[in-house]
Amino acid sequence: DAGVTQSPTHLIKTRGQQVTLRCSPKSGHDTVSWYQQALGQGPQFIFQYYEEEERQRGNFPDRFSGHQFPNYSSELNVNALLLGDSALYLCASANLDRGPDNEQFFGPGTRLTVL
Amino acid sequence: AQKVTQAQTEISVVEKEDVTLDCVYETRDTTYYLFWYKQPPSGELVFLIRRNSFDEQNEISGRYSWNFQKSTSSFNFTITASQVVDSAVYFCALSEDYTGANSKLTFGKGITLSVRP
């Protein structure tokens, strides 16, 4: 049973560019959340998708957008990259239909470096 | 607003010592969930335990134990007889009530644990 997978593993971009990160949830999961983890910090919630709609959003600017596909996989898009966007981007999945008493499983992350 | 504080930043112990990682949280919700995650150098967050606010029963699982006290808003984690493989960053996290454990997680800044042989 495959866990949460993310691609690519590493990415280098320059300021002003746009980037797309991808996530495939754990089998049987229908909800995908994205987190940004700056070096030496805890993960910060970006947003969560369920049934192809944004369900919750953290305190991130509109440059951060996402999408969820019918197969539950998800993309995170960041426009007009800034140096401060350099971070580890983590994807987490869960099954909302199982109710509140279950946990989110995290992927290995995508390391984004903005030069 | 929710907040998780992990006052310890780095802890270094010698193998076989016991170590306790502290976590203090703030929330206005009456029902919430608390978590501990482990992050090894590979980067992937590994789930360790989940507790909801109604369940103050402390638990022991192998070398791991947890102490949840609502009166002091603390959710501490103890590793007994630590091993080198326990070296990692440990995060405490809090989840809002109305959507349960699947919802937004608020993390602390993490505690870097180094276990020396």
Image: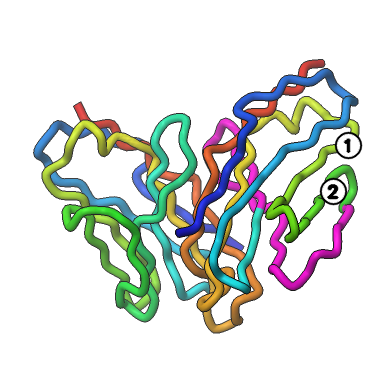
Which tag, 1 or 2, sits closer to the chain's start? 2
Q: Is residue A27 visible?
A: no
Give the quarter of the figure containing the N terminus of chain B.
bottom left
Give the quarter of the figure containing the C terminus of chain B.
top right
Mark 2: which secondary structure?
Answer: strand
Pointer 2 residue: B65
Mark 1: which secondary structure?
Answer: loop
Image: magenta residue range: B36-60
Pointer 1 residue: B80
Locate residue B78, reporting x and y percent. 81, 41
- Identify the residue shown where x is 54% and y is 66%: B28
Amino acid type, label 1: Thr
Q: Where, by quadrant of the figure, is residue A52 drawn?
A: bottom left
Locate residue B11, reporting x and y percent. 70, 24
CB within 8 Å, label 1 to label 2: yes
Amino acid type, label 2: Ser
Residue B80 shown left or right of residue A72 in the figure = right
Residue A95 shown left or right of residue A81 in the figure = right
Q: Chain of mark 2?
A: B
Farthest front residue? B71
For residue A82, above or below residue B46: above
Q: Chain of mark 1?
A: B
In magenta stretch: residue B37: yes
Whether labels 1 and 2 share one chain: yes
Closest to the observer: B5 or A11?
B5
Q: Residues within 10 Å of mark 2 (few under 14, many from 20)?
A: some
Locate residue B9, reporting x and y percent. 60, 28
In magenta stretch: residue B67: no
Q: CA distance from mark 1 to mark 2?
A: 8 Å
- Identify the residue shown where x is 14% and y is 46%: A18
For residue A2, above or below residue A69: above
- Identify the residue shown where x is 29% and y is 60%: A75
